[in-house]
Amino acid sequence: MASKAPTPKTGRTKSKRLHAHSNPLADKFFAYPTCPDAADWPSIFPALLPTPTPTPTPTPSSSASAASTTTTQPPPTPLPQQPMMMSTARGGGGGGEGEGEGGRAWPFFVDIGCGFGGLTVALGTAYPDCLTLAMEIRVRVVEGVQERITKLRADNPGQYQNIACIACNCMKNLPHWFHKGRCDKLFILFPDPHFKQSKKRLRIISPMLLSEYAYILREGGMLYTNTDVEDLHKWMVQCLDEHPMFERIPPEQLADDKAYNLIHNVSEESLKVARAGGRKFPAVYRRLPTSQCIPRVPPLFS
């Protein structure tokens, strides 16, 4: 009796499946700079950040003619060590992170766990004078967002040059990218809730990670969160309320904040929650000046 030919499998293959989450503690290799000064920002925002001018370096040689020969080695693009305010008409200073032609330093937004890039693209349109860097731990998703940005740039010449996406494990490597006080806004939308008690240490909002976010945020910078999981929302609010370097901004003070309006409606996760009729739990915090940060801990002795 002749055997039946196996039926070919249909649908998405395992190698092409995009996982919803990724373990941030896994030993995955992500290229990252050894320090913020070593980051190659012109390659990330090539149309806005000029490549540094090569500096001639003399090459030692025994002959007089060879002594006059020089080699050009472009130096790494340094990042500014001073906090950058939100003005878009900055000038002066040498070359640095997010610093364009004429010494203008660009305001910097970071979309942590950008997903498929809906918020990043919207920020690029709403804030054309700001740089928005999307960071995502899933490499396949990063490739998709990069392709999306490339297509948007091709279809809209001169636009979307201020947004980019890189693969990064923010729980491990975020301080390698930014100097203290460099960022103006951070966005953490619909992160993995990690419901199990043993997995809560993997949450992207935690007391230890908040100190890193406070480090890269300028004084007065904003941290935006949103989720459809109420328990996770309460956890994030508790962590932020207890951290000495953040204070919550009431929603009534955010009516004119374009970024606050965007976190509700433009990301793929927010649209999915809206289609399902679910609730969203946003929260926005301001990074306090260091001089005002008083540790909120009980005294050792009464």
Image: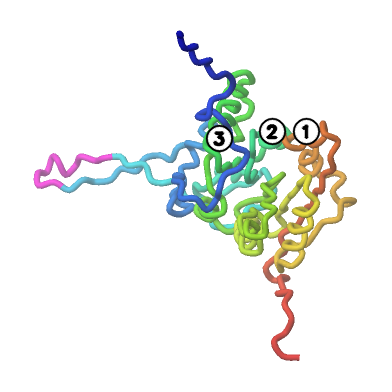
Q: Is residue 126 above or below residue 299?
A: above
Nearest to N terminus: mark 1 or mark 2: 2
Q: Label 2 amino acid?
A: Gly
Can the viewer see residue 176? yes
Spatial CA distance of label 1 from label 3 is 20 Å
- List the residue tagged with mark 1: 271
- Left-right relation of 269 to 1: right
- For the record, the magenta segment spans 61-71
Can the viewer see residue 187? no
Q: Is residue 162 above or below residue 281?
A: above
Q: Residue at x 87, y 51 (%)?
A: 251
Q: Residues within 10 Å of mark 3 (few under 14, many from 20)?
A: many
Find numbered disc 3 in the image and state the secondary structure of the residue it sits on.
helix
Question: Any magenta on residue 63?
Answer: yes
Rendered image coloring scheme: rainbow
Give the numbered dot on residue 154.
none
- Residue 198, percent from left and from top: 63, 60
